[in-house]
Amino acid sequence: MAEQYDIIVIGAGHAGCEAALASARMGAQTLLITMNIFNIAQMSCNPAIGGLAKGHLVKELDALGGQMGIVADDTGIQFRVLNKSKGRAVWSLRSQNDRIEYSHRMRNIIEQQPRLDIRQHHVKGLLIENDRAVGIVTEVDTQFLARAVILTAGTFLDGLIHVGLVHFSGGRAGEMASIGPSRQLKELGFHVGRLKTGTPPRLDGRTIDFSQMEEQPGDPEPVPFSHHHETCDQEQMPCYLTRTSEQTHDLLRSGLDRSPLYTGIIQGIGPRYCPSIEDKIVRFADKTGHQIFLEPEGKSSNEYYVNGFATSLPEDVQIKAIRSIPGLERAKLTRLGYAIEYDFFPPSQLFPTLETKRIQNLYFAGQINGTSGYEEAAAQGFMAAVNAVLKMRGENPFILSRSEAYIGVLIDDLVTKELEEPYRMFTSRAEHRLLLRQDNCDIRLMKYGRQLGLIPEEMYQDLIRRQQAIAETKEMLKRLKPNLDDVNPILMKIGASPIESSESIDRLLKRPEVQLTDFAGIYEQEIFQPHCSRFGIKVREQVEIDIKYEGFFVRQNEQILKMKQLEEMKIDPDFNYQEITAISTEGREKLQRFRPLTLGQASRIMGVTPSDISILMIMLGRDKRLRL
């Protein structure tokens, strides 16, 4: 008799791990199916978490009750906050991680999680009844039944690995591809596309001459991803910077006639923002060198990841080109770089819950939706699982808006925009990024994590106390007006203009060069002291941000309120747009394909004009068939 579960998660990458943990922690009996138990949470490409905009996703996921930030902190070997020279809206945390330890730690957490089983199987197909997913069948014809299935197959769906003119089936190096589910989905009528990604070679660190490179240390006081952690105390390891040379480029060009990318063998679309090294030397032919970062794979490994040198060129070309780079003249390759093509299913076929429109109770998360990156995958896995459990309970779905979270931007972009290349999160994609900073993820989202039962009460109460302290401090700063004899010497010391009449500290803080700690000599409260408690530091930082950016926050909130009116206008997802002939032909076609749930979503679909939205708005007002 087939075993019965509430939720089955296929794939134990970053999307699958978050999906399985969220599902089980919300009380659903969950099964995580993976081809290889030893490769759970494998960092298939670079051994790093976060980065520009991606760090926001990790911290948001953590505020909701996800696991990635905790494991990233526990296994980090270097931490850096990027973009510190720019405004706080684009500061992003990135960690270098111990690849082996990250996978081991995540697997251990999954194994200890109640209501979560792990099975090593190759999934042959999905069990579908009356257009509903009801389970899976494995390579040995074992059936597992479930009320919902979440597919997080990564690059494994009909995966094809390329090294030079040689190509072979595989999901990633050393692992077989998944063939059955992809072909079954095509037969069920899903639209499919092909994407490509790549990875660089790895090197034996004992054969690298680091003395010819520039050392890249981490931050002296590491900032953790997780709100569960106050600090990151583990020893950090440096990365190293070098550059390609003209000789490197000449050697790479010599292999282009055997490049699967330039001989037309690879048909999938690759990421424009993260090109292979052979693509760089062709597209940026005027550049005499490109930055190469040597990143350690872990404390117990000699391997180094060659960031910036993704390639699918033949082995002999890879070796020669690597050895032409300063510091790598004697380098030995432990693993070759390669490209991989794989099937993805355009996410216009999904609801914002990540449930498929064609098959009920079937959810897609991660690279199957055309995204790239561990962080984008993890966020999708978490959201898919939460919504699968909520649907199973008969409760309302959990959908974050674009004004609430980068996760909201990510999913809204996926379900409303045409995907022309692998999707990667950027700060520029978030129109309200000044409000969606990494420093206020807990303030924005932890209330939802608590409601879902994924955030401990003690942790949430700590946030409530901090928010109260922030509000009280801001009120206090509006009242405090230091004497001119006290404040002007302080202002002149920090290079600010003196004042002629008494002003509140609140007003003084609006000057970019003024900080609360500048007034430590006048006031004794903890908030003014440079070395106050961790709680006090968090309060102080938030107070300063709120006061300095207050005018910008007001304007962005006004824009959000205007947009909210569109978001609140619901549309029946089953409505036939072909009946509204006043809408443009392209608009009807796009609306019919994407089937937006709100007028706001409809307005963001490429090809749907403002005129189309105006007509749709009028129709919503008078045609009950259009409204949800």
Image: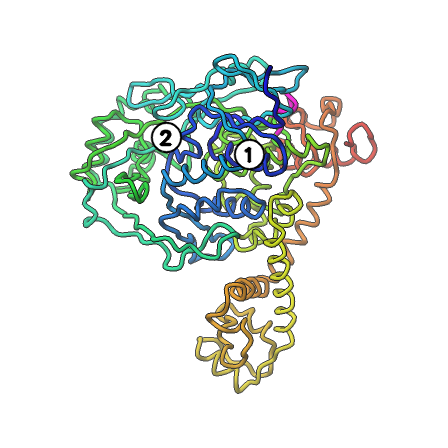
Please say if 584 is above or below 379. Answer: above
Residue placed farthest to the left in the image?
Answer: 330
Residue at 52% across, 71% down: 516
Q: Is residue 356 visible?
A: no
Secondary-structure class at tag 1? helix
Secondary-structure class at tag 2? strand
Q: Which amino acid type corresponds to the residue marked 1 in the rendered image? A: Ala
Instruction: Please identify the dominant SS of the magenta region.
Output: loop
Residue 491, x across and y down, in percent? 49, 78
Extent of the magenta region: 355-362
Q: Which corner quadrant of the image does residue 550 belong to? A: bottom right
Name the residue beneath numbered marker 2: 198
Q: Which corner quadrant of the image does residue 359 belong to? A: top right
Q: Residues within 10 Å of mark 1 (few under 14, many from 20)?
A: many
Residue at 50% across, 77% down: 520
Residue at 36% across, 38% down: 100
Is the C terminus in the top left, top right, bottom left or bottom right quadrant?
top right
Please name which of the two marks, 2 or 1, marks the residue nearer to the observer: 1
Name the residue beneath numbered marker 1: 19
Lower position in the chain sequence, tag 2 or tag 1: 1
